[in-house]
Amino acid sequence: MMNMSFAAENYPTSGVRAMFERARAYNDAINLVLGEPGPTTPDAIIKTAVDGLLAKKTKYTPNLGILPLREAISRKMIRENHVYFNPEDEIIVTTGATEALMLTMLTLINPGDEVIIPDPAWPDYLGQVLMSHATPVFAKLHEENQFKMTADVIRPLLTNKTKLIVLNSPANPTGAMLDHSDLAEIAKMIEERGIYAISDEPYERLVYDDNRHVSLASFEGMKNYVITINSFSKTYAMTGWRMGYACTNAFMIEKMVKLHENITSCLSEAFQLAGAYALDFGDESIKIMRNGYLENRNLLVDALNSMNGFRCHTPPATFYAFPNIKGLNLNSQAAANLILDKCHVVTSPGGAFGESGEGFIRICFATSKENLAEAVMRMKNYFG
Ligand code: PLP
């Protein structure tokens, strides 16, 4: 067998998927492991796609995505994120946020460039940095600072090789959020240093209490440096549709679309029509799903804080709890295995999200109330 590529040989395997596979041994396992909404896509969005298919919207589309969808994204960015992107040339529709992230890295990065990524973080950032032949630099995030990736955390990591910073607020797996002043400081630093930033914002609508999502791109001058990435997956329970988008300056988009043409070319037109419908008319369904997640969050965090060995801060956003399990005196993999074997509840070891995730586990609470209550009862019975 000939040698495989460096990226393929060294690509990290997903600790989240590994738990999912391990759970197959138990047919009554409750899945709180994958980062996926429990509800299915609202019917009106599905109907728009079905109508599109029946109307024979079955051909290739422009590589940037259909204009009505780009216009809907532009309206949404003004309405919710307070920043204007021209639908003609500052927006590209992608196969999930995952492709938008990869495209951005391939567009910006040369071998040897340094990319600062959060630790703990959604593991694909690291995989994508490695596939781009860049050097990952880990911004270690700590429970004491609510896992916030602030300018103070980033600044000491900057070198003359730093090309890109990846920000993810609200964050997977910790639920951490950056507020207006945190982002203002980061915007200033980015402009002073002339480096690029990805702002990956797929959890922007899953924000609770008095917290408010702020987009880095909304700060003066940031369009030159920031690529805002978003997704339909979490907001509208559309993970399987594989729809996302990136917004930035026309210069970047012009380069990204060339690579996109060679990777996936475009998405189904019927799905794109459904995406435009979701952005324009999907608000009510977001509110319903979010209220359900909020009740689940409160139930889960209270229960975890009453269990021996667990301590859980209240996540301001997302559908993840990230409890500290150091009181169990086990590493995060052993703790997740124990919870699976004894309670038949599937969670993710924090170490799967990076070294700084060690000592924690991630629990996705975007499931039904009944499932979550049953999971919590099983854990309480075992851990006391
Ligand atoms: N970014 C973050 C932080 C995520 O958690 C995920 C999915 O879990 C994605 C991006 C990918 O989203 P998509 O389904 O749109 O590819």
Image (spheres, helix red, strand yellow):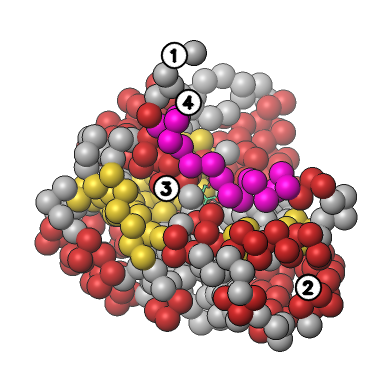
C-alpha distance separating marks 3 and 2: 31 Å
Q: Position of residue 226 (x, y in %)?
A: 28, 52
Q: Position of residue 126 (x, y in %)?
A: 41, 47
Quadrant housing residue 130: top left
The magenta-colored residue range is 7-22
Q: Residue at x 42, y 48 (%)?
A: 125
Q: Point out the frontmost of discs 1 and 4.
A: 1
What secondary structure is marked by label 3? Answer: helix
Quadrant housing residue 344: bottom right
What secondary structure is marked by label 2? Answer: helix
Q: Look at the image and say whether residue 142 sits in the magenta stretch.
A: no
Q: Point out the frontmost of discs 4 and 3.
A: 3
Q: Residue at x 73, y 40 (%)?
A: 47
Q: Point out the frontmost of discs 1 and 3.
A: 1
Dots 1 and 3: beta carbons under 8 Å?
Answer: no
Give the residue type that dot 1 points to: Met
Dots 1 and 4: beta carbons under 8 Å?
Answer: no
User: In front: 33, or 279?
Assistant: 33
Q: Is residue 108 left or right of residue 99?
A: left
According to the image, label 2 marks what residue? 379
Give the residue type that dot 4 points to: Thr
C-alpha distance separating marks 2 and 1: 48 Å
Q: Residues within 10 Å of mark 1 (few under 14, many from 20)?
A: few
Q: Point out the frontmost of discs 3 and 2.
A: 2
User: In front: 299, or 17?
Assistant: 17
On whether ligand 1 comes within 8 Å of the CB at mark 1, the answer is no
C-alpha distance separating marks 4 and 3: 19 Å
Q: Position of residue 6 (x, y in %)?
A: 38, 29
Q: Residues within 10 Å of mark 3 (few under 14, many from 20)?
A: many
According to the image, label 1 marks what residue? 2
Instruction: Tell me if residue 72 can be seen.
Output: no
According to the image, label 4 marks what residue? 264
